[in-house]
Amino acid sequence: MSSNTILEVTNLTQEFRSGDKNLTVLDHVDFSIEEGTVNAVVGPSGSGKTTLLGLCAGLDRPSAGQVILKGINIGVLNEDERAEVRNKHVGFVFQTFQLIPTLTALENVMVPLELRGKATGEVKEYALSLLNDVGLGDRTHHYPTQLSGGEQQRVAIARAFINKPDILFADEPTGNLDTETGGTIEDLIFDLNKASGTTLVLVTHDLELAKKCQRVIQLKNGKIFQDNWNDNTEKLEQVS
Amino acid sequence: MSSFFSSWSWKMAWRDARSNKKRLIIYISAIIVGVAAQVAITSFRDSLNNTINNQSKELLGADLEVEKDDSTFSDVTIAYFDSLGGKQADMIQLPSMAYFPKNGATRLSNIRAVKGNFPFYGKIETEPASAAKLYQEEGKALVDNTLMTQFGINPGDSIRIGNTTIEIAGALLKVPGEAAAASLIGPRIFIPKAKLDTASLIQQGSRVEYKRYFQFEPERDMQQLEESFDPFAERHDLGYDTVEERQEEIGEAIGNLGKFLNLVGFIALLLGGIGVASSIHVYIKQKIDTAAVLRCFGASSNQTMSIFLIQAVVLGFAGALVGTLLGIGTQYLLPSLVSEFLPVQVELTVSWLAIGLGLFTGTGVALVFALMPLLALRKASPLYTLRTMEGSLMRLLNNKTKWFIYGLIAATVAGYASLLTEDLFAGTMFTIGMAVAFGLLLLVAKALIILIQKFFPSHWSYVWRQGLANLYRPNNQTATLMLSLGLGMLLVSTLYFSQDMLMKELNFATRDDAPNLIFFDIQSDQNEGTTELIKERGAPILQNVPMVTMRIDSLNGRSAEALDEDSTLDIRGWALRREYRATYRDSLMESETLLKGDFIGQAESGSEIFPVSPAQEIAEDLNLALGDTLIFDVQGVPIKTYVSSIREVDFQRVQPNFFMVFPTGVLEQAPQIFVTVTRAADRESSADIQQAVVQRYPNISAIDVSLILQTINQLIDKISFVIQFMALFSIITGLIVLASSVATSRFQRIKESVLLRTLGASKKQIIKIISIEYLFLGILSALTGLLLSVGATWLLGYFYFDLVFVPNLWVIGGGTLIITALTILIGMFNSRSIYKKTPLEVLRLETT
């Protein structure tokens, strides 16, 4: 693992039991991600994209292989230890926003830092500034159901950045939004990412979005089919 | 544990609870009523115990009560009493007919002839109040208020007891240490002792209790007195009671009643627990996504669980607090329900013990029953942010954890029930009983569901099929409702059916050909005259039975005293010591069956040993076998007998039944009294016969069976009302659980209803589907509870009352109808938002 590598995936395999059969969702996947890069993981439905994201972010444990995040082998940690790693190093943006419905926009954004035990006043100030950055300075006390889809995703983005993550995982961040709103959200993610220097891993179906990333990892049947840097549009269209 | 106390957990718990108020109130509502029942009973019990402690001397009316049955105190005894010192008073107590010349009414009463200043503690309450003080010096009577009201008698009217007529000084309202309900069994009449001497009531065979009451100076060492008195009492066959003993006896009786009612109330709390478990289960299931998000952003499993654990504890406590306040209020209703059965007027106080218990148990039950979903939530994976959790919440727990929680619930229930009953065995049996009842209800619920699935009426219309199918679809509420409503029904119906069964059996005695009037204490020289009086009034003599009193002198050559003292023998002491009222006749009665040996109806003349036929029950208590010899002391004359046969006797028949039957030719010359059984055509005829007999022979007493039945009915009514009042808590909890179950399941039903509406279902169709579902739920729950209660009553009848229970189908039908109607009503009321609003509105409102 080079000094710039933030995530190293080695021989990663994930199997599920389905009835009396073993389903291999990820099959000996290897790759590494450098700090500060913008990466996309693409592939058809069932190719293992979301499973890969879950394992890389420490949401699950692999059947085999290892995931080293910020030098920590997260596969050997227990659930609570992995939670601590996520809190310190990882940010998330989900397709379905995953805001906590009973918390206001501001409170949703504050959660990751509050979990670290930071003083509410300090957290609140930073959360408000982030909400301002995503254009929701006037909607801070609204509950998720009082916000549109795009607004909810903006709150989710603010929440993702509040703990100044080393790496941000975004699972189909524009998948539930219309094209125009999706475009705004994309811009927001890239802008905030650029400003904070966070490593970005985007899981997407959207080839236009993937094209905007520095590196595109293509999955097919649980294996890496292609792993390309920069000018990769043509090949992407072929596999998708 | 540290997560539970972290400020973040409390902050998050508050933030989350803020917008879930409705759901969380539903969650606590189920335990409120159960806690209220507990607190009301415990607080009332506490107040009652305090009252009994404060008024302990009034319970007995004296420091010491000495009693002898059927014969006056001997000179030696009286001399001993004199040596004890203190103030003394006498009371002679016996049953006798009271006759009211004003309107000719008669009634078997409990006569108490008093000499001296009894009661020494507390006071007899009368109307007018002065009557209690003056009746002795003025030679007047105090008559139970119920009797005076019943016969329209007023102070100043007269009463005839035996041969003496006495003016009534006033109505007797309360006797210290006696429950008002005592007057139902035998209306009390107080007269001065001198009046009894002129009444000539005490005759051969009369059942008389002679009592002497003592009041000692306060510094008298009662324990020492008791120690020295005890051997004397033993030698002279005296019974005695001290204040402490009476307090203990009453405390025990009240304690038993309290424990029983507490257990009935506890069932309500358990039902509440099930309600909590069911609503928190649904609530937590909806919180899985929140938990997953929190886990994603770094919350530990304990931190996540703590948020909802705090909510469970705080809300459990809030529910317990509301329940406690309600319980304290309810306590004030209880005296009016049970005052007739209590020997004291309860001074109600707020019991801190009850409050503490209510808060602790309410919070505890809420927590224990919420534990399963809370521990499941602890296992919620952050992966659920990416993939929705499939299957049941309980799937997250391994079997070991599940069994641990079941064990914890069982241990909590057994522990608390043992605490309530102060008996580990009783607590354990209660828990097993409840587990069996729960198990049976679940089993029946499951069986019904399988049957519905197997014989699903696929030809029914869509809405009916949809409504019916909701009973077994995922997230159905069938089991919860069957359990809560079914258990409530089971309790209340078993009480009702048992009462019905007993009353049917008792009323059997009032059928047209059954005896309904019994005369006893008829002296030999009055027998013929009594028979004539009855016949003259057109009533048949159904039985005219001689009765001879005797005691057992020896059994198989060993004296009764020696046998009584020999603890190695399997013989009941009371059966050796008791006075037997035996009869003689030449054949068995219709109510008797020969079990062993030969019934010999005629004694051989000149024989020295005679056959005797004991009833099965007494034969067992005396451990008698055929051929055993018994010597009876028949009022001073020893009669040697041997057991020639053993009879089975139906003691439930309204007629004189005997433990010992002699053949004819043995006891004819012994002092005896007669019992005559007749049947009066109606109430007037009965009153007429009684009046005629009592007027001519005032010492003869009569039992009007229909009056006794009426009294028993009244008593059972009163007792069952108290029990049903407590069972009502279970029903109310059942309905709250129903309401909360409907409300929580509403969140599960919404998506499906909205989808149906989106796909074109009309409001009417949605209403129909929902109401059909509740129709079936109501019918199934009520029927399950009712059917199980039929089984329980049948078992009670078979094993305990020795009766065959025939269920009343009207009651089953009516009960089912009421519960079903209530279920539909509550179900529809709670689901109204689903069909009143547009699909989008519903989704926006309900998913918050």
Image: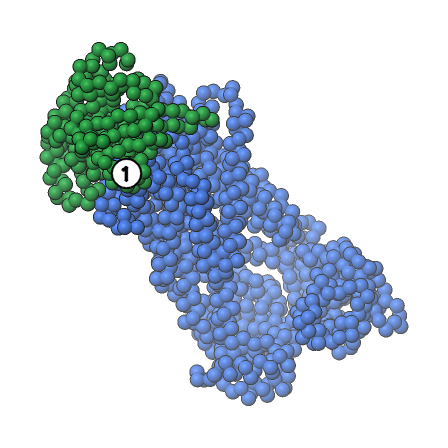
Q: Amino acid at mark 1?
A: Arg
Can I make out residue B783 in this image?
Answer: no
Q: Horizontal and vertical percent for residue B677?
A: 71, 59
User: Color of chain B here?
Assistant: blue
Depth check, front residue: B346 or A132: A132
Q: Horizontal and vertical percent for residue B230?
A: 58, 80
- Does B511 sit above or below residue A146? below
Task: Name the residue that disc number 1 marks.
Answer: A82
* Residue B695 in the figure: left or right of residue A89: right
* Residue B417 in the figure: left or right of residue B317: right
State which quadrant residue B92 falls in: bottom right
* Residue B760 in the figure: left or right of residue B711: left
x 61%, y 71%: residue: B94
Quadrant (top left/top right/bottom left/bottom right) for the C terminus of chain B: top left
Q: Which class describes the residues within 10 Å of circle 1: few (<14), some (14-19), or many (20+)?
A: many
x 36%, y 55%: residue: B360
Depth check, front residue: B206 or B835: B835
x 45%, y 38%: residue: B481
Depth check, front residue: B795 or B185: B795
Can I make out residue B565 in this image?
Answer: yes
User: Color of chain A here?
Assistant: green
Q: Horizontal and vertical percent for residue B676?
A: 72, 62
Chain ID at mark 1: A
Q: Horizontal and vertical percent for residue B428?
A: 51, 54
x 55%, y 88%: residue: B83
